[in-house]
Image (spheres, grey):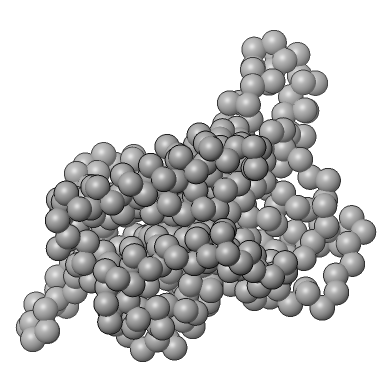
């Protein structure tokens, strides 16, 4: 079985963890287009729309937090930065923007941009499992379109279990035309009710014990965050009173934290990724504050562009978000045997902290960089762009 030290494979890109809409896969939000009626010559000569570096930075930090969590397994990491809730919130915002175009085209675009990188990555994982005595049944169709958890064996589990995020994202994409229409009928009531499904699953009916049941749990856990993306895009959050937003957000965070700590006996930990109800409410409160602050204070992180290296790093993270997410677990897996070889070099054994998880963390990022260079071009092909080593 594949292992990577204490790199755990539960969902943060964890048990319950890009993201991604077509804009999300290539980066963050975009500035508004030229107003209707603007002079065509003037528009054509204008600069391309500026990136929203606030969203770009949040996405980059979310990916870093995912890799960090899977390296160290810190239970408190999700409370410091609920990365997957943030990713779903950002994707919801971009999906609402994109649905200004015909819904079928938007859905096809999302699938087209996500599936080729998934197929490319999946070819290596499936081949590895076949070599290690795995024989798939009809469920292998989920390796073509992962609307359910793809099958696999224990040898490759650490690599493929992160696919829960892609599966949940694709379902949100399929449901978004309907969800957005319902949301716009009564934004605030619908937003509040989007926290109801997780309560029903937790206290009333746990759903079927199959792939569909797993889909229900993950959709319910992050539904509010996705709908928050709609609320941000439509200006609903911006119109809310600051006192109400802060009060509701802190109440959600408080309930999520209380439920996580008071039910440790049930889950064996206070880790939010093991407790979907706590995850749903903690993520709801945090993402609501981040989205509201963005809208209310007009935060754009435009000054980030002054720092060339940092700005460049954020750009690469956003343009290669799918690649980083898919390949990071394999990087952690490969880091272990690679470090084992370092012990055979006396100088490395003497001067390098080979037993440190921090060292493994560093080696994993080097391997992730290699995967970005070797495999990131698939994202360009999926987006119908000229393939590049780095964006």
Marker count (numbered): 0
Residue 362: name its quadrant.
top right
Q: Residue at x 28, y 51 (%)?
A: 248
362 sits to left or right of 148: left
Q: Residue at x 63, y 30 (%)?
A: 360
Q: Residue 60: x and y, percent? A: 41, 48
Percent coordinates x, y for residue 107 in the rendering = 46, 81
> Residue 44 location in percent, x, y?
16, 78
User: Is residue 347 positioned above or below 129 on the image?
Assistant: above
| Residue 135 visible (yes or no) | yes
Q: Position of residue 338 (x, y in %)?
A: 73, 33
Q: In this view of the protein, which residue sits in the foreground, 1 or 130?
A: 1
Q: Residue at x 50, y 43 (%)?
A: 259
Q: Is residue 293 left or right of residue 320?
A: left
Q: Is residue 102 above or below residue 308?
A: below
Establish if 342 lies above or below 260: above
* Image: 100 above or below 197: below
Q: Depth check: 45 or 236 in front? A: 236
Give residue 191's quadrant in the image: bottom left
Q: Which residue is at the front of the view, 298 or 175?
A: 175
Quadrant of the image containing the C terminus = bottom left
Q: Residue furthest right?
A: 133
Which residue of the protein is positioned furthest toward the top in this rendering? Answer: 350
Query: Viewed as shown, does residue 198 lie left or right of 71?
Result: left
Q: Residue at x 64, y 68 (%)?
A: 207
- In the foreground, 156 or 186: 186
Residue 233 in view, yes or no: no
């Amino acid at each position: 079985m594949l292992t990577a030290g204490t790199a755990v494979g539960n969902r943060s890109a964890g048990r319950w963890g890009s993201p991604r809409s077509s804009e999300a896969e290539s980066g963050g939000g975009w500035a508004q287009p030229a107003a209707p009626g603007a002079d065509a010559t003037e528009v054509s000569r204008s600069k391309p729309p500026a990136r929203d570096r606030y969203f770009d930075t949040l996405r980059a930090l979310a990916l870093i937090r995912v890799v960090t969590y899977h390296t160290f397994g810190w239970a408190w990491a999700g409370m410091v930065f609920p990365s997957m809730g943030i990713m779903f919130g950002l994707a919801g915002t971009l999906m609402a923007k994109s649905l200004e175009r015909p819904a079928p085209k938007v859905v096809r675009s999302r699938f087209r941009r996500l599936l080729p990188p998934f197929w490319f990555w999946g070819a290596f994982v499936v081949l590895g499992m076949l070599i290690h005595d795995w024989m798939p049944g009809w469920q292998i169709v989920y390796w073509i379109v992962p609307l359910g958890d793809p099958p696999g064996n224990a040898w490759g589990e650490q690599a493929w279990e992160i696919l829960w995020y892609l599966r949940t994202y694709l379902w949100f994409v399929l449901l978004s035309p309907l969800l957005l229409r319902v949301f716009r009928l009564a934004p605030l009531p619908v937003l509040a009710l989007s926290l109801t499904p997780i309560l029903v699953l937790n206290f009333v009916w746990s759903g079927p014990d199959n792939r569909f049941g797993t889909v229900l749990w993950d959709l319910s856990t992050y539904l509010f965050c996705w709908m928050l993306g709609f609320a941000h895009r439509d200006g609903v959050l911006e119109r809310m009173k600051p006192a109400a937003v802060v009060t509701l957000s802190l109440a959600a965070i408080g309930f999520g934290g209380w439920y996580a700590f008071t039910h440790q006996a049930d889950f064996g930990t206070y880790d939010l990724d093991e407790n979907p109800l706590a995850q749903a409410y903690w993520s709801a409160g945090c993402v609501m504050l981040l989205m509201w602050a963005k809208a209310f204070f007009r935060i754009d992180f435009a000054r980030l562009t002054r720092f060339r290296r940092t700005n460049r790093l954020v750009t690469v993270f956003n343009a290669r978000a799918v690649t980083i997410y898919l390949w990071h677990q394999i990087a952690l897996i490969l880091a272990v045997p690679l470090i084992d070889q370092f012990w055979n070099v006396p100088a490395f054994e003497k001067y390098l902290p080979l037993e440190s998880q921090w060292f493994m963390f560093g080696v994993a990022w080097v391997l992730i960089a290699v995967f970005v260079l070797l495999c990131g071009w698939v994202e360009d092909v999926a987006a119908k762009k000229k393939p590049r080593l780095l964006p």
